[in-house]
Image (tube, rainbow, N blue to C red):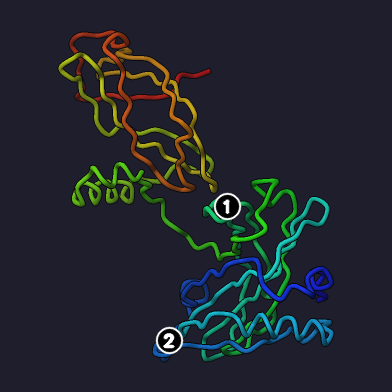
Amino acid sequence: MMFKMFKKNKEKLEKSGEDSTIAAKDLTGDGAGEEVGEVKTTLSFHPDANVGPEEKYYFQFLNNELPLLKPNQLSISGIDVKQNDDSIIITAFIRNSLSKAVRLSDSPLLFVGPDDEIIGRKVFPLGELGELPAQSSRPWEFVFTPKDLLKTEFPQTGWKLAFELNKPHSLDLEETWKNNLSEADQQKLDNLVKQMDPPKKGEINFMGLQANKAGNGDLHVTLLIRNGNEKNITLQQLPLVVEDASGEVIAQGGFKLDDLEVKANTSKPWTFVFPASLVTKEEIDFSTWKAYPPKQ
């Protein structure tokens, strides 16, 4: 392997990416052994890598600046990102703090922006890295082609390359909700989200949590906005229809949401208030009900 990024950055002895670290057992099943102390990883090149003296100095300098790892970890430390035609080339250290060599297999990696938004995803044949020596760092290049990218623009700093583990669908609470809900209620919501089947990949759906009619006739409807995408979504406006147990439409209207963001693979609760003028039924049966965006 030749490192195409080196000529461009040989005067710039700093890396532009962040670090992403996991327990080795989460990816490989390995991880038994001493858990105390910290590990400094030694620079290691693939035996077939074509690395000149200047490149060796460059990578050695960056490796010396890397943070220490805990024992039994795997880490990806972002070095450089650049565009090559329609593709993105990322150079990063793959780091092994195990006390033994490890050989990785095909694994999905995520190209993640500073706001944790997923920019790209691709399954890489990490076996091509060869055997990673114990407590070592190995520089490698990763190419994301257009079909691997979810966005066309990418950040120059603050990004990271991360192992994709099977992260469960989780709760995403706005700060105002965190401030107004008790810890017990937050835990109930969290448990509810964990117990439900997650939305299908790429799907956005809505689940009713609570509905009631206020004394002034307004209808308050609380929904879980469920995002099954691998990227954050932003809702600017949302039309909603509400039906009660009879199947009758009891309210219908549109809401401006001021760029409400729902993070990737999460569910966010939100309350929608229909003014009394939009409520079309006096006696409402809330024993079962549903709310949904009307079909376009």
Q: Which mark is residue 135?
A: none
At a point 42% along the width and 39% down the height, the residue shown is 226
Residue 135, image x and y in percent? 57, 88
Q: Is residue 94 above or below residue 53?
A: above
Query: Reading the chain from its start, which is encountered first: label 1 or label 2?
Result: 2
At a point 57% along the width and 82% down the height, the residue shown is 96
Q: Is residue 292 above or below residue 263?
A: above
Find residue 108 and report its image quarter.
bottom right
Between residues 138 and 100, which one lies in front from this camera angle? Answer: 138
Mark 1, Cα crowd under 10 Å, few <14 / some 14-19 / many 20+, is many
> Horizontally, is 39 left or right of 183 in the view?
right
Residue 159, image x and y in percent? 60, 60
> Horizontally, is 238 left or right of 57 in the view?
left
Do tag 1 and tag 2 residues touch (Cβ < 8 Å)?
A: no
At a point 38% along the width and 51% down the height, the residue shown is 170
Q: Is residue 24 above or below residue 182?
A: below
Residue 278, image x and y in percent? 32, 11
Between residues 236 and 138, which one lies in front from this camera angle? Answer: 236
> Horizontally, is 112 left or right of 281 in the view?
right
Between residues 59 and 138, which one lies in front from this camera angle? Answer: 59
Question: For the residue marked with disc 2, what is the amino acid?
Answer: Ala
Q: Nearer the viewer, mark 1 or mark 2?
A: 1
Find residue 219 and report its image quarter.
top left
Q: Which residue is mark 2?
A: 32
Q: Quadrant of the N terminus?
A: bottom right
Mark 2, Cα crowd under 10 Å, few <14 / some 14-19 / many 20+, is few
Residue 258, image x and y in percent? 46, 31
Helix, strand or loop under label 1: strand
Q: Residue furthest front?
A: 11
Q: Which mark is residue 118?
A: 1
